[in-house]
Each structure stands twice: as C-alpha cells, then as structure tokens.
C-alpha cells in the first residue's frame, strides 16, 4: 500500500496529494529552467540536457523511431518513462507533465462548466494515436503537431518568450526615457535582474508565432468543457500512457460499501471514476484528490498482481480501423503534390539536418532549434515543406542567419533530425547557396560601391569575392566598382549576406537550398574551380 | 555649440524632455592645430609592457585620463573570431589600457562594441570576456550595448551624412580611447581607427557603406578620441575584416598611438605597404581638418 486514506487521520502525515503537487511544481520549475537555458551560455556546448523533456516522451520516440525504421538511441529515456508507467500507471500525466500542471494551475482562471463525465470523446486519443503512428511509418509524421510538449515549448519559444521580452523592453524603455531618476533607481536594477534571469538575451522574431500560441490557447480553452479535456480526450501521448497503464501494477481501489456521496467522482480531474466508483486505469493520473475527499477513507492505491481485470478501451472497431486506414492512405496522397517532384527552393534546413524524408520523419516540431538559434535564422515552416512539414525548422535568411561557429541546433535536437556536429564538421556542411540579383545589387544596378555581403561572409576564404568593373553610374559617369560574385564551392549557405544586405525590402542576395550537401540531387553544376577565381 | 551644451542636450533628449535632436558643432580648437602631430610606435612581445612604452612619448595615460573621468575604451570586438585570427583588437592590449586608465584615476571605464556577429559569441571568442574578467575593479564596466541608449545626433559638418544614431556613453565620455585593430577590408582597403568608430553607431550600419570614406570622416567630427591606439600586434592581410585563415595573418607585435586620429590611421597604413592617400577615410578626414595625413609632417617616435 502506498497511499491510503487512513493517512489523513494522522495529522503528522502530509496529505498524499501534497506530494503530487510538489512533484508537479518541481517538474514545472525544472521545465522552465531548462527552457531558459536553451540558449548560448558563453560556451560552444550547452551544459544541460535542455531537450530532456522531449527525450522522455515515448510518443515522440515511437513516432520518430517508426519513421526512421530503427530505434533512435537518443530517445532511450522514453523507455524509462514507459517502464515507470507499467509500474505506476499514468503518473506522468498527473505528476510530471508540465502541460498538465499548467492546465491544473489555470483551473481557477478557466473554470469548467460540466462535471466531466462525458465519455464519448475519450476514444478520440486512441484513434489519433493509431493514425499518427501508421502515418509516421508510411511517411506522414504528424505526432509533433499534437504532442503536448511540442505544443507547449513551440508556443513558449515562438510566441510567449519574445512577447514577454517585447513587453519588458517597451516598459523599461518608457521608464528609462520618461520617468524621473528615482523611478529609474528602482526599474533599472530590476531590468538588469530580469535580463540576467528570465528574459531572453535579445529580441527574436518568429513566423507562426500567433498560430503557435492559438493552438496552446485552444488546449487551455478546452478546459471550459471539462477539466483536463485535452489530456482525457485528445492527447496522443496520454493515449500511449493509457495503453501502457492498462497493465500497470499500481491501482486505485474504492471501498465496496461506501454510501452515495460520489465525492471522488466529482473531484476526479480525469473523470476516471465511474458510477460504481471503479477507478479506470486508462484515465487515472494519480492526482490522489479522491483520497483527500473521500469522507470514509475508502480509497487506496495498491500494487496488485498481474492477473487483474483490465478496463476495456471501448473503441469502435470500425473507427479505429478507419483511423489506421487514413494514416495509411494519406502519405500516398502526398506523393501526388508538385512538392513531391520539386522541393521548395526556400526549404533550407539547418546544418546537420538529415536528408529531407528522414528529417521530417524525425523532427518532432518542438521548436528547440529555433529557440536556441542565436542568429534568429531558424523559423518554423508553414507550407514550404508541405502539410506535414509545418513547424519544422527552415532558415529564413532575410530575418536571420546561421552563425558560422555555432552548433547549437544540433545539440538541442531531441530526435537527431539535426545531427550534432563538431565545429570543424559544421563548417563543411553546405545548407544552401547564395545568388545575386543584379537588378538590385548596388554595384551592378546603380554603379554604387557596397560590400556589406562580402564583409560579413564568414568563410576564411571568402565565398563572396569582387571583380573590379568599369560601369556607367546613374549620372552617366564611368566609375570603377567592385561587383560581388559567388564562389559556389566556398559558400556554406549561412545566409548572413542576405540578412545584412543593406537594401530596404528584398535582399539583393538570396540563399536557396541549391547545392545543399545533404541532397546529392541538388548538386550545383561543377564550375571546375577550387574556390579561387 | 560647446561640449557642455551638447551634453545637456543629449541628457535632455534621452530623458524624453527635448524633441530636438542634439547636434554637434566643432569649435576652432581642433581645426587650428598648430603643432605637428605626435605619433608613437613601439614593438615588443609583451603587450602589457608595450602599451606603457607606446604611451610614454605621448605623456602617459595621465595625459588623457584625469581623476574621476568617465572613460570609454572602444576596441573592435566585431567578429566571432579568436585573438590569433586578427579580426578583433587583442584583449591583452585592451586590458593594459584599461589598467592604465584605472591607475590614472578614472571614475568609470566603459568597454563595449556593437558587434557584427552574435554579440555574446564575439565577446567570448575574442578573448575579451575572459581577459577583462581578470580585472577586479568595479569601475570597469564591460557590457553589451543597450538598444535604448542610441541617440540621434545631427552631424553639423557632415558632407555625406547628416544624422547618425550614436551610443550615449560614447557621446558623454570625458575621455574616449579608440583601440582599433589594423586589418584588411574589402571595400575601404583597410579598417583602422576611423572605421572602428562605427562600433558606437546604432541603426542600419550597412547604409554607411555607400561613400564610406566621407561618412567615416563625418562621424569623426562627432566621435573624437582623446587617444587612438592602433593594435598591429598582428595584422590581417587578406579576407578582412573577418579573416579566419591564419595564413592571412602577419605578426608585427606593434602598437601605434597618437592624439591625432588621422595621423594614427595614416601611419598604420604604411604597415601594410600602402600609402595614406589610398585610404579614402583618411583623405576625407584630412580634408575636413580633422588631423594630419602627411607623414612628413607627423613627428614619429619609435618608443
């Protein structure tokens, strides 16, 4: 026996659910700590396993492994989570999951209307799980769209964190410029403190920031229908835990003759207790609220043998098979798009990204690489990579670039979709190729000297070089200008030229995925040069 | 407008009280330099000692920093490159200058640069962060520029640029010490002292590059270092201003120092086997009367 109502009588004992709450808070604090640490720290290597949350996630591990065709060793910690689930049931949902904790935390802000005894939607998550896994296997990897951690971290990284920074910058700029000195005596140290602790180092900008946030908000607004609506009905990770928890050894038991109070049913945030007060293994997340609220102290959680009755999934066979069939059919529909024939040239993947099909299969859309990208170059894709590629990272070189000496994205990727590269190795990876627009580039179009792209080009032997050319400028004068040109063999596609191009609007130099080293089919024509003109 | 009035304007503007942009007008003092410009050059392996030696003929740090002064030491930390690659000012040179300024009684010393690569990587990889961490004195402030502190300034005498956004501390400093690294540059041939002043600019600096030479001279009418120390301990000969290939680096173990920013640039040009008149910014600044570029008219002392 682990937790028992009788403990409540003894005043010296801490109520069981306090432990659960403490665990939730510790895990949440750890989660935020690691989130903030997902950043450059003054060293080339990130000291913490900031991506651990995604590596203990068995849904993502399974989905990525099924897509890869082998078990991804990086995600081995997920097996540990599953083993604990076999022992304890869906403890993860109640004790660890930061999304669950936040949902519990906002319960008072978004109160639920009903008691939450609706069982009709419980099966959705199993259909979703089936669909996702079959899809991942056959080439439509969508687990990251609905995985709770992906939803959470993505939205924090792409929307909440930058917005928080914008808010504080605006506020402290106002106080700095408008407020009297004594106010600044308070606000400036506070700003310094916040910058040193929770605020990001600088302002970042992301595509799909609003969409990412809306998805998270929907999860929170579903609380209106019933508590933990997402966890009960949608969460495919929860579904995987439920499937495993069906065999769990730790089980909640209610007394046989306990009157009619139904307190346990009313307080259960997962709606796990039925009319006969059976606690369903599939739903119970061990919040232990029922122990606390049972007036007769009839409820206990005990380890029991293997040969116990197991709750039914109550799936409709037809619907389940239907969801599997959908997962099996859709990947082939994708093959009929133009994208299947010709990839979007602006689908520039981070250095170390696997070949596209493997990459997209493994990418869990967690947003970690975009959060950690110190050049603010990595952005979530919208439809550049097709429907299945949303929220996967692409380099958008006009907003930011890939820092030449930086290898952080490969370090934080939890599934190895972006390989971890040694600095030397990274500098040899070509993610794209720059190309000049001579109608816009000043030395070509206007006869005006400019060299910002060449100045910033980071390869030791510069990929952007100059030719001295005599041209006629807009005053009709003959002038000698240095016109930039690109040496394909030297360009790594980092995009700093496009980011820094001083022209307003569209850059005069653009990076595309042409020549990316992960895809031999994209090889550039051999110019026969070794990099020297 | 004199300096005092200018500082008052800067303070008012950044406090949001005044909407008119501060503007600088250079008095006659600088234009009518009668004595020949003095320039010191020293060579040696020990960069700490080298700094002392090169400042000697100029009168030592005490000549430039007085008790309680707000001092800005402005190195080049623009690139994510290590000291050996010669893209940034050598951290030991910066450290020695900071220590001398502290000894001279500086009230506070500010060291910063607006970088081209990611800020933190530049500060770390340049060796600046580690080296300056060795100075345990609270008067030293080594920090990343704060976006809020760029102030638009009218460049009264500007020929190519009329207004620039400039870092407040650079404007307010009692003593501004410019510590560029001498290196190759694709457009301006070399980047020296005048180019290094771009590190105090906010906004889109890329726009500076059209007519760069004149714009640097215009900037030099506002950012006037009391002392320029050009770091030529190792110089980058090709693929500047970033470099990255040690084959492009030549070790000279040399420092050049002068009160005259134009003279310092002019002389440093010769280290590359070039003539001062080949550098547009030197010529433009000379023409504006900001300093001497004729090597024959500069008193060069080998210290």
Image: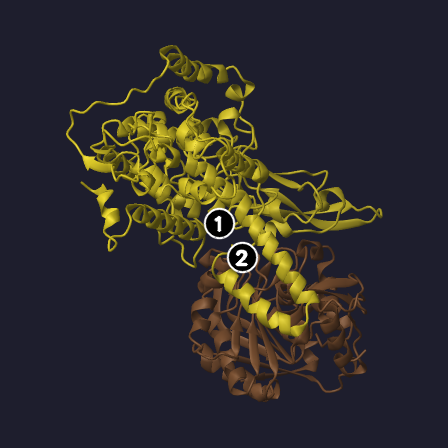
Mark carried by residue A404: 1
In which quadrant of the rendered image does the C terminus of chain A lie?
Answer: top right
Mark 2 packing: few (<14 Cα in 10 Å), some, or many (20+)? many
Q: Is A444 or B6 nearer to us in this picture?
A: B6
Q: Position of residue B133 (x, y in %)?
A: 44, 72
Q: Chain of mark 1?
A: A
Hue of chain A? yellow
Which secondary structure, mark 1?
loop
Horizontal side, residue B276 vs residue A306: left or right: right
Q: Which mark is residue B11?
A: none
**Which is more toward the observer, A123 or B248?**
A123
The label nearer to you, 1 versus 2, is 1
Quadrant of residue A438 within the rendered picture: top right
Foreground residue among B140 and A497: B140
Q: Chain of mark 2?
A: B
Residue at the right extreme of this rendering: A475
Residue A321 image point, x, y percent: 37, 12
Q: Find the distance from the CA under tag 1 to the CA under tag 2.
A: 12 Å
Q: Residue at x 53, y 25 (%)?
A: A386
Residue at x 46% of width, y 82% of height: B49
Image point (52%, 43%), residue name: A109
Establish if A220 lies above or below A337: below
The percent position of residue A266, horizontal first and vertical second, equals 39, 34
Q: Quadrant of residue B209?
A: bottom right
Which label belongs to residue B242?
Answer: 2
Chain identifier, brown in the render: B
Q: Position of residue A288 (x, y in %)?
A: 31, 40
- Disc 1, disc 2: CB below 8 Å? no
Judging depth in this view, the residue of A344 and A201 nearest the camera is A201
Secondary structure state at the residue bearing disc 2: loop
Location of the N terminus of chain A (image quadrant): top left
Q: Residues within 10 Å of mark 1 (few under 14, many from 20)?
A: many
């Amino acid at each position: 026996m682990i937790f028992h109502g009788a403990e409540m009588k003894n005043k010296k004992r801490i109520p069981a659910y306090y432990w659960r709450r403490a665990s939730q808070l510790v895990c949440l604090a750890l989660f935020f700590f690691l989130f903030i640490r997902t950043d450059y720290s003054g060293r080339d290597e990130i000291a913490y396993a900031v991506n651990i949350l995604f590596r203990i996630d068995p849904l993502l591990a399974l989905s990525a492994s099924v897509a890869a065709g082998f078990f991804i060793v990086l995600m081995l910690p997920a097996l540990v989570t599953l083993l604990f689930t076999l022992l304890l049931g869906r403890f993860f949902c109640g004790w660890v999951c930061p999304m669950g904790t936040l949902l519990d935390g906002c319960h008072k802000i978004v109160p639920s209307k009903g008691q939450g005894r609706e069982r009709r939607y419980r099966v959705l998550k199993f259909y979703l799980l089936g669909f996702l896994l079959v899809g991942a296997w056959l080439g439509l990897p969508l687990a990251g769209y609905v995985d709770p951690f992906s939803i959470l971290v993505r939205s924090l990284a792409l929307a909440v964190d930058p917005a928080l920074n914008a808010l504080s910058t605006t506020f402290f700029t106002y106080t700095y410029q408008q407020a009297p000195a004594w106010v600044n005596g308070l606000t400036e140290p506070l700003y310094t403190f916040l910058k040193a602790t929770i605020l990001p180092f600088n302002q970042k900008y992301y595509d799909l920031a609003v969409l990412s946030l809306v998805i998270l908000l929907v999860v929170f607004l579903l609380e209106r229908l019933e508590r933990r609506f997402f966890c009960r009905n949608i969460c495919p990770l929860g579904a995987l835990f439920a499937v495993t928890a069906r065999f769990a050894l730790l089980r909640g038991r209610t007394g046989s003759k306990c009157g009619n109070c139904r307190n346990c049913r009313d307080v259960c945030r997962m709606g796990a207790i039925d009319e006969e007060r059976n606690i369903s293994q599939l739903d119970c997340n061990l919040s232990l609220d029922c122990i606390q609220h049972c007036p007769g102290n009839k409820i206990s959680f005990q380890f029991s043998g293997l040969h116990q009755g197991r709750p039914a999934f109550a799936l409709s066979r037809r619907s389940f098979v239907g969801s599997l069939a959908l997962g099996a059919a859709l990947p082939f529909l994708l093959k009929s798009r133009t994208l299947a024939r010709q990839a979007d040239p602006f689908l520039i993947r981070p250095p170390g990204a696997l070949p596209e099909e493997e990459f997209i299969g493994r990418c869990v859309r967690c947003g970690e690489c975009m959060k950690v990208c110190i050049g603010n170059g990595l952005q979530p894709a919208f439809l550049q990579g097709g429907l299945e590629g949303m929220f996967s990272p692409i380099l958008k070189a006009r907003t930011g670039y890939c820092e030449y000496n930086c290898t952080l994205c490969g370090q934080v990727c939890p599934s190895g979709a972006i390989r971890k590269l040694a600095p030397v190795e990274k500098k040899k990876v070509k993610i794209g190729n720059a190309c000049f627009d001579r109608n816009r580039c000043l030395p070509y179009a206007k006869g005006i000297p400019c060299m910002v792209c060449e100045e910033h080009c980071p390869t030791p032997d510069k990929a952007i070089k100059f030719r001295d050319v005599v041209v006629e400028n807009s005053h009709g004068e003959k002038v000698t200008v240095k016109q930039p040109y690109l040496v394909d063999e030297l360009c790594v596609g980092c995009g700093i030229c496009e980011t820094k191009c001083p022209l307003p609007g569209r850059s005069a130099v653009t990076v595309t995925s042409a020549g990316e080293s992960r895809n031999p089919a994209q090889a550039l024509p051999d110019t026969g040069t070794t990099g020297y003109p | 407008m004199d300096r005092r009035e200018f500082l008052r304007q800067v303070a008012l503007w950044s406090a949001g009280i005044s909407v008119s942009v501060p503007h600088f007008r250079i008095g006659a003092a600088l234009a009518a330099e009668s004595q020949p410009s003095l320039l010191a050059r020293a060579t040696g392996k020990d960069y700490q000692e080298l700094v002392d030696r090169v400042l000697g003929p100029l009168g030592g740090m005490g000549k430039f920093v007085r008790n309680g002064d707000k001092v800005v030491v402005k190195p080049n930390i623009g690139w994510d490159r290590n000291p050996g690659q010669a893209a940034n000012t050598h951290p030991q040179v910066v450290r020695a200058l900071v220590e001398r300024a502290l000894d001279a009684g500086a009230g506070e010393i500010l060291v910063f640069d607006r970088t081209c690569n990611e800020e933190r990587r530049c500060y770390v990889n340049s060796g600046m962060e580690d080296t300056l961490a060795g100075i345990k004195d609270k008067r030293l402030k080594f920090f990343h520029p704060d976006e809020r502190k760029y102030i638009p300034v009218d460049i009264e005498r500007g020929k190519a640029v009329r207004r620039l956004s400039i870092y407040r501390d650079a404007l307010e400093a009692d003593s501004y010490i410019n510590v560029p690294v001498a290196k190759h540059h694709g457009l301006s041939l070399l980047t020296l002292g005048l180019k290094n002043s771009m590190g105090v600019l906010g906004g889109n600096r890329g726009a500076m590059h059209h007519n760069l030479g004149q714009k640097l001279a215009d900037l030099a009418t506002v950012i006037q270092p009391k002392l320029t120390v050009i770091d030529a301990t190792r110089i980058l000969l090709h693929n500047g201003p970033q470099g990255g290939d040690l084959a492009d680096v030549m070790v000279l173990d040399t420092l050049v120092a002068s009160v005259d920013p134009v003279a310092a640039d002019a002389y440093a040009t010769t280290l590359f086997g070039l003539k001062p008149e080949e550098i547009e910014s030197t010529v433009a600044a000379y023409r504006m009367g900001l300093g001497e570029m004729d090597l024959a008219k500069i008193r060069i002392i080998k210290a």
